[in-house]
């Protein structure tokens, strides 16, 4: 059935070729811009089984998804996660170009070699500071030394690493140049991300929000940033840092949205399809998954959802407004 199935094209003519799947809402960190400290996680029976996640991912590959990214929460805390990654890896070279994940790095020392064995060639690691005390404050529970051991293990295993850093006013804005030098010195690309208004997080996001236009202007006083047309399939726009030779990405949903070229959809661990990270338009894929052993209902639900993919997000950061999106980033997987 796979090769002859119609590709997913939305009403704005955008081809959907990139799927992000949150395999769990659970995480061993509680990053201050992502979660509340006292998070209540989903009951396990609400979460798709690994077999259902495999079936779901396979259905999207049959519809033209070329890049599949596993996210969370923290994907590597999901029990038996390597069995899912190993199963999905059968699609590599058979429609799927890349199987990858975004991780906080806490479990990488344990899983790096197994990931390589499954064909995972590239990962994103979320890292907002190189200061152990600050790292504990940002993540609430995290151990920077453990994360750095994991990054080292993935590097030794031959996995290409990109560091993702959320730019946070008064927290890590004075460290960004050092993060660039460290990442590029290790041979890692670095992408800076603006904080997004998602979920009530026990803090005021206007206090956290740091526009990347300002960050870039500051960096331009320290480095020579040469524009490139390099793309990885996601929303980042990359510059080459002449002094380090490394790439620096900017993800700017607030100051400059990237909606016109959006090729992505996201599925949560409960089987809810989000056609846009910054909108509440959804489709339930768990019901058709469980309704029949055939994927016919599932593909019909996917078609209906893609036809409703919005043109763009509604992100606004305003001190007097509720978050633009009520759900937590960890529920959707970024």
Image: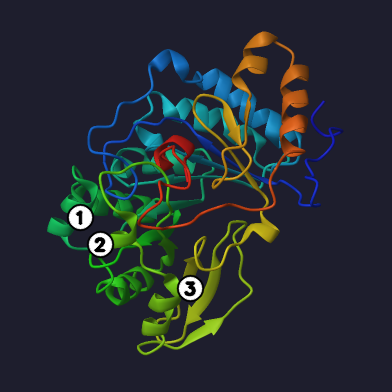
Instruction: Please rate how many residues cluster around mark 3, counting C-alpha atoms within 10 Å: few if below 14, some from 14 to 19, many from 20.
Output: many
The tag earlier along the polypeptide, 3 or 2, is: 2
Estimate the spatial distance between the alpha carbons at disc 3 and disc 2, rounded to whole Å.
18 Å
Residue 237 location in percent, x, y? Answer: 56, 69
CA gap between label 1 and label 3 equals: 24 Å
Q: How many marks?
A: 3
Q: In the image, 59: left or right of 223?
A: right
Position of the N terminus by quadrant? top right
Up-down: is 102 above or below 254? above
Q: Dividing the picture into quarters, in which one does residue 201 lie?
A: top left
Look at the image and tell me whether residue 30 can be seen.
yes
- Specify whether residue 145 is in view: no
**Marks 1 and 3, the one that precedes in the sequence:** 1
User: Going 79% across and 30% down the picture, which residue do you hit?
Assistant: 2
Residue 295: image x %, image y %?
A: 74, 19
Evaluate if marks 2 and 1 touch, with contact meaning CB atoms under 8 Å apart: yes
Per the model, the C-alpha gap separating discs 2 and 1 is 6 Å
197 or 126: nearer the eye?
197
Q: According to the image, label 3 marks what residue?
A: 247
Q: Are marks 1 and 3 in contact (CB under 8 Å)?
A: no
Residue identifier under label 2:
129
Q: Is residue 109 above or below residue 252?
A: above
x then y, percent, for residue 306: 73, 38
| Residue 135 badge | 1
């Amino acid at each position: 059935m796979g090769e002859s199935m119609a590709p997913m094209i939305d009403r704005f003519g955008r081809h959907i070729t990139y799927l992000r799947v949150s395999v769990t809402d659970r995480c061993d960190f509680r990053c201050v811009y992502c979660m509340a400290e006292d998070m209540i996680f989903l009951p396990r029976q609400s979460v798709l089984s690994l077999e259902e996640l495999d079936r779901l991912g396979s259905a999207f590959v049959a519809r033209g998804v070329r890049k599949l990214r596993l996210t969370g929460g923290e994907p590597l805390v999901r029990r038996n996660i390597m069995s899912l990654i190993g199963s999905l890896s059968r699609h590599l070279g058979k429609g799927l170009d890349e199987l990858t994940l975004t991780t906080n790095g806490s479990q990488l020392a344990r899983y790096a070699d197994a990931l390589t064995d499954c064909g995972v060639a590239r990962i994103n690691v979320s890292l907002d500071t190189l200061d152990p005390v600050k790292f504990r404050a940002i993540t609430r529970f995290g151990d920077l030394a453990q994360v750095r051991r994991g990054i080292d293990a993935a590097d030794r295993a031959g996995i290409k690493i990109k560091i993702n850093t959320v730019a946070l006013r008064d927290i890590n804005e004075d460290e960004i140049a050092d993060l660039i030098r460290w990442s590029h010195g290790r041979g890692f690309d670095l992408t800076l991300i603006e904080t997004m208004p998602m979920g009530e997080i026990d803090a005021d996001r206007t206090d956290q929000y740091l526009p990347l236009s300002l960050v870039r202007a500051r960096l331009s006083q320290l480095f020579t940033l040469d524009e490139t047309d390099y793309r990885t399939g996601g929303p980042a726009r990359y510059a080459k840092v002449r002094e380090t030779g490394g790439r620096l990405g900017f993800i700017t949903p607030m100051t400059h949205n990237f909606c016109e070229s959006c090729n992505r959809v996201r599925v949560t661990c409960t089987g809810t399809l989000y056609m846009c990270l910054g909108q509440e338009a959804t489709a339930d894929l768990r019901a058709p998954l469980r309704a029949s052993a055939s994927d016919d209902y599932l593909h019909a639900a996917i078609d209906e959802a893609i036809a409703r993919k919005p043109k763009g997000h509604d992100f606004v950061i305003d001190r007097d407004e509720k978050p633009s999106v009520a759900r937590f980033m960890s529920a959707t997987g970024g």
